[in-house]
C-alpha cells in the first residue's frame, strides 16, 4: 500500500506560488492542504485559484493545523529565518525559498533548529535537482584535485554521491584539475509593484536574489569557499542592481560571479579544467522551448554536446547529425526537488544511516557564506 501523501501548507501568496503550488500538487506523494496569507481575502483568492481546501488568515494559524505535515515558505527573504524557526517549533518539515536567509548566521540557526526538532529542511534551489546537474557532478569527478588542497578535502562531501555513480572512464574526456568557474545570472527588471527585490529591509538586491544561483554554482563546482574575494556593485536607490565578484581558492582555482537586475537574461556557467571545460547556458532552469543540454569543450577543440538521458528521445538524427527537437526539458527539476524532500521526510533519521540532507545543508550554508563574503567585499 502506498504511504499517505505529505500534506503541504503554503506561507505566502506571491508570484512564485503560482508555479510552485502547481508543482507540489502534481508531484506524486504530495498534496497541498492549506495556504496562508496575512489577509483573509488574499488567502481565499489563492486557495480558490489553486484548488486548495483551506484558506488561512495568518501564518501562525497555518502552522498549528493538524492537516499540515510540511510547509512551503514562499515569503520575502527577510522572513525565512523567523518562519523556519516557527515551523520547526511546530514540528513541520520545511521547503524554504531561496535565498535561504539574509546571512550565514541565520542559515546556521535555521539548520540547527531543523536538526534539533528532527524535521527535514530543504531550500528550493531547484537546479541542484536536475538530472543535468548529476552529469556535471559526474564530469567533475574527472577533475582529479591535487592532494592536500582544500578542494581535495571538500570532494568527499560532494552532492549526489549516490546518484552519479556511472564510471567516469567511459566519458571519453577529462575535465582535469579545476582552474576557473564563472557563473552569471541576470534578469532585466524582474519587478512587480512594491517588489521585495527593491526593498533592502525585506532582503532585496541582486546579490541575494540572483547571486544566490551564481554563488551556488561556484560552491557546487569547487566544493569549497574562496580565500580571497574582490567585489563591486552598481547601486540604485540603495539597492545593488548589478554585482561582479572575482575570487581565489586555496588550491589556486579562481572564479567570477556576475548578477544583475539591469542586464539581459543570463543563466550560464562555465567550469574550466586544465583539459576541458563544461559550458551551460541555462543551468538555473532549461530554456522553455529546449531540452536541457550542455557542452564540454576539450583543449584540442573537440566539442561534446550532452543532453541528460531523459531527453534522448527528443533528439532527431538526420544524416548522422544529432540535434535536439524544440520542446521543453522533460526532467522537471521542481518535482525532483519536492520528491527528494518527501523521501527525506519518510526516512527514519534515528536509523544509523548517513543523512542525505547534510550535503544540501552544507551547500546552502556555504552559498550564503559566500554571499556574505561578497557583500563584505563590496562594502
Ligand atoms: N525558486 C525560484 O525560481 C524563485 C522564483 C521567484 C522567487 N523566488 C523566491 O521566492 C520568495 C518569494 O518571492 P516572490 O517573487 O513570490 O515574492 P512576492 O511576489 O513579493 O510574494 C511574497 C509574499 O510574501 C508575503 N509577505 C509577507 N510579508 C510581506 C512583506 N512585508 N512584503 C511583501 N510580501 C510579504 C505576501 O503574501 P501575503 O501578503 O498573501 O501573506 C507576498 O505575496 C523569495 O525568497 C524569492 O527569492 C524563488
Image: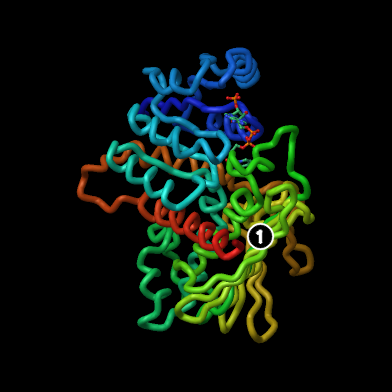
Q: Residue at x 75, y 32 (%)?
A: 193
Q: Position of residue 121 (x, y in %)?
A: 40, 41
Residue lying at the far bottom of the rendered structure? 300
Q: Nearer the viewer, residue 25 or 238?
A: 238
Picture quadrant of residue 154: bottom left
Q: Is residue 8 left or right of residue 207?
A: left
Give the secondary structure at mark 1.
loop
Residue underneath mark 1: 293
Residue 2 against residue 324 in the figure, above or below = above
Q: Residue at x 44, y 70 (%)?
A: 167
x and y percentages locating residue 252 in the rendered image: 50, 81
> Residue at position x 44%, y 31% from top?
29
Image quarter of residue 270:
bottom right
Q: Is residue 239 above or below residue 374?
A: above
* Residue 1 visible at all: no
Pick whichever, 313 or 297, lies toward us: 297
Q: Relative to 224, is 273 on the left or the right? A: right
Above/below status of 135 relative to 247: above
Drawn side of residue 331 relative to residue 163, left or right? right
Can see residue 227? yes
- Measured as percent of width and height from the top left, residue 130 is found at 55, 52
Amino acid at each position: 500500500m502506498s504511504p499517505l501523501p505529505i500534506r503541504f501548507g503554503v506561507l505566502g501568496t506571491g508570484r512564485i506560488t503560482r508555479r510552485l503550488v502547481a508543482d507540489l500538487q502534481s508531484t506524486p506523494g504530495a498534496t497541498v492542504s492549506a495556504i496562508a496569507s496575512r489577509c483573509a481575502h488574499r488567502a481565499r483568492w489563492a486557495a480558490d485559484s489553486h484548488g486548495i481546501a483551506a484558506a488561512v488568515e495568518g501564518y501562525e494559524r497555518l502552522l498549528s493545523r493538524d492537516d499540515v505535515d510540511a510547509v512551503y515558505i514562499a515569503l520575502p527573504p527577510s522572513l525565512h529565518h523567523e518562519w523556519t524557526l516557527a515551523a520547526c517549533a511546530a514540528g513541520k518539515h520545511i521547503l524554504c525559498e531561496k535565498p535561504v536567509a539574509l546571512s550565514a548566521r541565520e542559515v546556521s540557526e535555521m539548520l540547527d533548529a531543523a536538526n534539533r526538532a528532527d524535521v527535514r529542511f530543504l531550500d528550493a534551489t531547484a537546479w541542484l535537482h536536475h538530472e543535468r546537474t548529476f552529469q556535471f557532478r559526474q564530469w567533475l569527478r574527472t577533475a582529479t584535485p591535487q592532494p592536500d588542497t582544500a578542494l581535495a578535502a571538500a570532494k568527499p562531501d560532494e552532492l549526489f554521491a549516490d546518484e552519479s555513480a556511472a564510471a567516469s572512464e567511459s566519458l571519453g574526456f577529462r575535465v582535469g584539475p579545476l582552474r576557473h568557474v564563472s557563473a552569471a545570472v541576470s534578469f532585466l527588471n524582474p519587478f512587480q509593484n512594491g517588489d521585495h527585490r527593491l526593498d533592502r529591509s525585506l532582503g532585496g538586491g541582486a546579490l541575494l536574489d540572483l547571486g544566490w544561483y551564481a554563488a551556488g554554482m561556484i560552491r557546487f563546482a569547487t566544493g569549497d569557499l574562496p580565500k580571497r574575494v574582490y567585489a563591486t556593485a552598481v547601486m540604485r536607490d540603495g539597492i545593488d542592481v548589478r554585482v561582479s565578484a572575482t575570487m581565489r581558492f586555496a588550491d589556486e582555482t579562481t572564479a567570477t560571479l556576475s548578477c544583475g537586475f539591469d542586464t539581459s537574461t543570463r543563466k550560464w556557467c562555465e567550469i574550466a579544467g586544465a583539459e576541458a571545460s563544461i559550458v551551460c547556458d541555462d543551468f538555473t532552469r532549461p530554456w522553455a522551448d529546449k531540452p536541457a543540454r550542455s557542452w564540454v569543450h576539450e583543449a584540442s577543440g573537440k566539442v561534446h554536446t550532452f543532453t541528460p538521458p531523459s531527453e534522448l528521445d527528443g533528439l532527431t538524427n538526420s544524416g548522422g547529425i544529432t540535434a535536439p527537437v524544440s520542446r521543453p526539458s522533460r526532467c522537471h527539476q521542481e518535482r525532483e526537488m519536492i520528491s527528494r524532500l518527501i523521501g527525506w521526510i519518510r526516512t527514519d533519521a534515528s536509523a544509523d544511516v548517513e543523512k542525505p540532507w547534510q550535503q544540501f545543508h552544507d551547500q546552502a550554508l556555504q552559498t550564503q557564506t559566500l554571499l556574505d563574503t561578497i557583500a563584505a567585499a563590496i562594502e
